[in-house]
Image: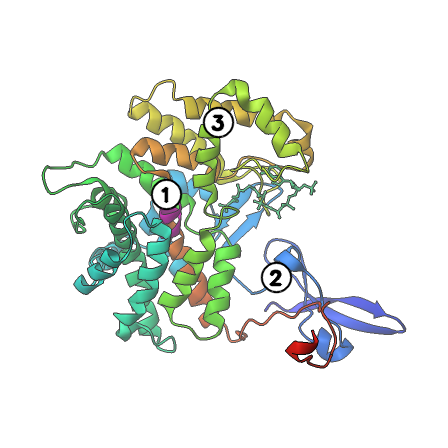
């Protein structure tokens, strides 16, 4: 925790309490309330953690008003344009961009961990074919703890590192296997001559009956999607990983918890929900009806792919994603794509509507990612697994950082209790 030179004074009745203020390298000051309950006997109340910093971190910084996302200080648009996913993984995990030799060593390590234990194939066969691949992933990633015992000791730095490499390397294999199983095709083993993104496309789309050649432009677009989703500060799934890890749980259990949290439509499930919404809208003339529904307080409908807890200007990932959507559709010769046309018109209509501008609701990363993924041939159910495999490195980097933090404690929020006070048990015949 940074040194403090400022204090905040909290007055409760006639008593006042001095609370230290920590100044970060970027972002708002943070009032340290750790001793508040001990000193004043009160809790703070912040459902949804809208004003609460739960940890110290040096990994990712977001300025929601400026629309800025930095990984270890590097802007996401520069990383998306000049770097690639495994280099960004190294940066997130180790804090600095690698030298050429370090990068080669890291890529070799990841490439040589992509196969999963052969016996794990049996797990997939136990699931129904129509299981959502996220359900399969939660189960199989959690089950890694049953296979890789030599990397579950969180107190051993070497075991932590091996677990990190295994997860980054094997989660794409697991996601691709979940997909292959769901469509009744044989599993495709990873190939060490392909890079990370090309290997994933190969595992998803190759079949033993014929050769599948990965288009380098599609591999680049896939890599960019991975890069744009690699980490995002203390979002719901990352906080879930940190909370799970705070009890000392093994890394595979923690990442399975993160995958489970990511699945929800308010988080990683939004890309699937967004594409389904765009298809339901169907064509630009139906947009006014959906905009009206999104604004209607009595209708639970929300514009999927719009709004963000932190970005209140624009989501810098959405800007890159929109360009990618144009490039990929162009490459694939998809002209006059009705979903893309609806998306562009919807974006225009919503941005011109005061409801959305006043509430600072802008397209987020999920608004365009589904269109690209569908054009590449992925079914909607695979969108969130792809997000999960991309985010695995972010979860692991945050997990690793937390375990090295001497201030780490088990996460244990308090509550504002509004239930009954003590009352006597009533026998069943008297109720
Ligand atoms: N459509 C219509 N209205 C919206 C939308 C939306 N997509 N998002 C927020 N609003 C409105 C809310 O109704 C609320 O209005 P009010 O102040 O009149 O009550 C106001 O904007 C603020 O919204 P909150 O829900 O309080 O904001 P919060 O920060 O809790 O939610 C969230 C952020 C969950 C992303 C929300 O905007 C949403 O549900 N968006 C759609 C789902 C989505 O795209 N999720 C992806 C997030 S990015 C990611 O995980 C990669």
- Measured Cα–Cα span from mark 3 to mark 2: 35 Å
10 Å neighbourhood of mark 3: few (<14), some, or many (≥20)? Answer: many
Seen from the viewer's position, the closer of residues 84 and 180 is 180
10 Å neighbourhood of mark 1: few (<14), some, or many (≥20)? Answer: some
Question: For numbered disc 2, what is the local secondary structure?
Answer: loop
**Where residue 123 sits: x, y (%)?**
25, 61
Residue located at (52% from left, 62% from top): 57
Seen from the viewer's position, the closer of residues 166 and 299 is 299
Q: Is residue 255 magenta?
A: no
Residue located at (35% from left, 18% from top): 335
Is the C-beta separation of discs 1 and 2 under 8 Å? no
Residue 286: image quadrant is: top right
**Where residue 77 sits: x, y (%)?**
45, 39
- Measured Cα–Cα span from mark 1 to mark 3: 19 Å
Q: Is residue 18 left or right of residue 83?
A: right
Question: For numbered disc 1, what is the local secondary structure?
Answer: helix
Relative to 157, does residue 186 appear above or below in the rendering? above
**Mark on residue 53?**
2
In primary-sequence order, the first of circles 1 and 2 is 2
In the rendered image, which quarter contains the C terminus?
bottom right
In primary-sequence order, the first of circles 3 and 2 is 2
Seen from the viewer's position, the closer of residues 430 and 9 is 430
* Residue located farthest toward the left when viewing the structure as drawn: 209
Residue 413: image quadrant is: bottom right
Relative to 372, does residue 382 appear above or below in the rendering? below
Q: Is residue 386 magenta?
A: yes
The residue under label 3 is 343
Magenta extent: 384-389
In front: mark 3 or mark 2? 3
Q: Is residue 204 left or right of residue 380?
A: left
Q: Is residue 95 visible?
A: no
Residue located at (46% from left, 63% from top): 241
């Amino acid at each position: 925790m940074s040194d403090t030179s400022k204090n905040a004074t909290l007055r409760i009745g006639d008593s006042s309490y001095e609370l230290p203020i920590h100044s970060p390298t970027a972002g708002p000051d943070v009032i340290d309330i750790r001793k508040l309950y001990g000193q004043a006997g009160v809790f703070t109340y912040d459902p949804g953690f809208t004003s609460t910093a739960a940890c110290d971190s040096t990994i990712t910084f977001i300025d929601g008003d400026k629309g800025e996302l930095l990984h270890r200080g590097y802007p996401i648009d520069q990383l998306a344009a000049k770097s690639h996913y495994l280099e960004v993984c190294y940066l997130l995990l180790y804090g600095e961009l690698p030298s050429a030799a370090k990068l080669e060593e890291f890529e070799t390590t990841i490439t040589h961990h992509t196969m999963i234990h052969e016996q794990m194939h049996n797990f997939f066969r136990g699931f129904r074919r129509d299981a959502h691949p996220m359900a399969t992933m939660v189960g199989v990633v959690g089950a890694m703890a049953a296979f890789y015992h030599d990397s579950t000791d969180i107190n051993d730095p070497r075991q932590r590192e091996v677990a990190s490499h295994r997860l980054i390397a094997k989660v794409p294999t697991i996601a691709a296997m979940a997909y292959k199983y769901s469509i009744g095709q044989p599993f495709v083993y990873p190939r060490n001559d392909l890079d990370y993104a090309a290997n994933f496309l190969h595992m998803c789309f190759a079949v033993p009956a014929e050769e599948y050649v990965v288009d380098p432009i599609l591999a680049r677009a896939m890599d960019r999607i991975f890069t744009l989703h690699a980490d995002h500060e203390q979002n719901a799934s990352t906080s879930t990983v940190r909370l799970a890890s705070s009890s000392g749980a093994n890394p595979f259990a923690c990442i399975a918890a993160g995958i489970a949290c990511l699945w929800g439509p308010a988080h990683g499930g939004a890309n699937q929900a967004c594409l389904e919404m765009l298809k339901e809208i169907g064509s630009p003339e139906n947009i006014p009806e959906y905009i009206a529904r999104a604004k209607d307080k009595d209708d639970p409908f929300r514009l999927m792919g719009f709004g963000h807890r932190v970005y209140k200007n624009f989501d810098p990932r959405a800007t890159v994603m929109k360009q990618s959507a144009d490039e990929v559709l162009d490459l694939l010769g998809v002209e006059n794509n009705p979903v893309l046309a609806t998306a562009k018109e919807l974006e225009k209509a919503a941005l011109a509507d005061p409801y959305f501008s006043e509430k600072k609701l802008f397209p987020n990363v999920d608004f365009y990612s589904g269109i690209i993924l569908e054009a590449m041939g992925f079914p909607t159910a695979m969108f969130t697994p792809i997000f999960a495999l991309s985010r695995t490195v972010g979860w692991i980097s945050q997990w690793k950082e937390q375990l090295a933090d001497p201030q780490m404690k088990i996460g244990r929020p308090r509550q504002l209790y509004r239930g009954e006070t003590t009352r006597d048990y009533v026998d069943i015949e008297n109720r």
